[in-house]
Image (cartoon, rainbow, N blue to C red):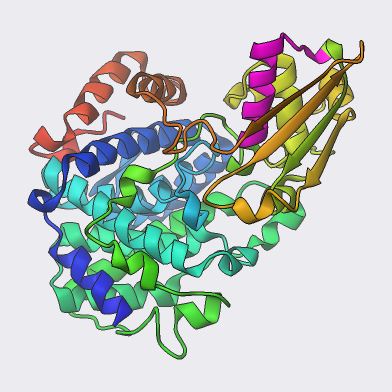
Amino acid sequence: MITKTFADFAAQLSYEKLPDEAVSAARKVFMDWLGNAYAGAGTRTGQIIQEVVAESGGNPEASLIGFKAKSNALNAALVNGGISHIVEFDDIYKNAIYHPGAPTIAAALAVAEKLKVDGKRLITGIVAGYEVSDRIGEALQPSHYRFWHTTGTIGTFGAAAAAGNILGLNQEQMLWAMGSAGTMAAGLWQFLDDGQLMTKPLHPGRAASNGVLAALLAKKDFNGATRILEGEKGFGKAMSTDWGFDRVMATLGKEWLVAQTTFKAYAACGHTHPTIDCILALKKDHGVTADDVEKVRVRTYGQAYTVCNNPTPVTTYQAKFSLQYTAAIALRFGLVGTAEFAQERIGDPETAAVMRKITVEADPELTPLAPAKRPAIVEITTKNGQTFTHRVDYRKGDPENPPTLEELQNKFRDLASATLPKADIEPTIEAVSGLERMEDVSKLIRR
């Protein structure tokens, strides 16, 4: 009984069962998620989502982050799940090709604020959501990712597990919540063909809201499919050709995947990050500048090539998914933050000139190493005939190459400044750093 095993775990998990590494990781992923939410609230995409919610009304149960407003838990999960994915700087569980924070934490916080629970319950809900959804996502890859945006599909289970844990669902109710979550899980990649931004953050927004809905219904004994993952007409068979849960279930409650989260170092698709790392290393080690370069050869794994081989991006969204653009701005400026993706910078002729020097290849020797490794090899040939090469297997921010706490805090400062007043930034960092000591998490969000 695969679904039952996950449901039992999520229902029975308590703060007292969490090791220190899981608690510490939960604080970090929460801070990273919150910074992304504040940044996303400052975008037009985020404002549209918030405007639609505001027009629909809703009891003021939970915060709409960055908007000085509240709505009901379903709406808050929708808004916060969506805005926290907009700037493409949110966390990753690489083995599932999945952004767990956006749907999972949005759902957890919405219910936690609604019930005015303490920080320990919020942390426990977050961990429950990560442990369940990371494993479900990993079990369905790689074929699931061909059509399905994992953050929308798998995220619905993470949201339901997190919300259900905080709501105090019993094991049977949690099983029903999982069933309802699975039948609502969706998120297709077709929007990539249109080169637009707004659909992608809608996926985790709906996943968060649907997960909360599934949990709230189950709390009132609204039943659902009890074998939604493994059934003959269930999630596994419908959405994957190579699914299998044995390996990921063997570590449930023993190995804490929340502590294996990747924190993004750059404001772009994670598939571009190893290439960016290589470029920055070559600049640091050899003093290479954009003016020095005759040509750049990028070799990476197949999925990175498929998703991010875009030599002519014209929108912010396309640029975030372009190996050529991200490599070029890394080479020119030595950084890849949110400012580098402003629409007015996308068509910069000097950047375009550098991009024309970059070739991108899917390397058949690197492809089988993903997703456990995210390899890239960059070879730069300079105008004076020198050739420099660098390889990366683990991105900056991966658990094998983790950021420091100071780096995560600085990332939060940068992202949150989009909509959070400067006076509130340090108190928020302090509050999140002591999240388990908060008596009422509804007081956490200052704006």
Please tell me whether residue 183 is drawn above or below residue 212 in the rendered image. Answer: below
Q: Can residue 280 be seen in this snapshot?
A: yes
Q: Measuring from the top left, give residue 407's x and y in whole percent.
A: 40, 21
Q: Measuring from the top left, give residue 87's x and y in whole percent.
A: 55, 36
Q: Measuring from the top left, give residue 401's x and y in whole percent.
A: 46, 32
Occupied quadrant, residue 56: bottom left
By secondary structure, the bulk of the magenta-drawn segment is best described as: helix
Return the residue nearer the eye: 283 or 348: 283
Occupied quadrant, residue 38: top left
Identity of the residue drawn at 38% across and 25% down = 408
Q: Measuring from the top left, give residue 293's x and y in whole percent.
A: 85, 17
Identity of the residue drawn at 68% across and 53% down = 367
Q: Can residue 67 be seen in this snapshot?
A: no
Identity of the residue drawn at 77% across and 11% down = 289
Please tell me whether residue 311 is drawn above or below residue 153 in the rendered image. Answer: above
Please tell me whether residue 339 is drawn above or below residue 261 in the rendered image. Answer: above
Please tell me whether residue 279 is drawn above or below residue 305 in the rendered image. Answer: above
Q: Is residue 7 left or right of residue 120?
A: right
- Residue 286, magenta (yes or no): yes
Occupied quadrant, residue 179: bottom left
Q: Is residue 439 left or right of residue 74?
A: left
Q: Is residue 174 left or right of residue 361?
A: left
Quarter placement of the N terminus: bottom left
Quarter placement of the C terminus: top left
- Residue 217, magenta (yes or no): no
Return the residue nearer the eye: 371 or 291: 371
Q: Which residues are magenta?
A: 273-290
Q: Is residue 87 left or right of residue 299?
A: left
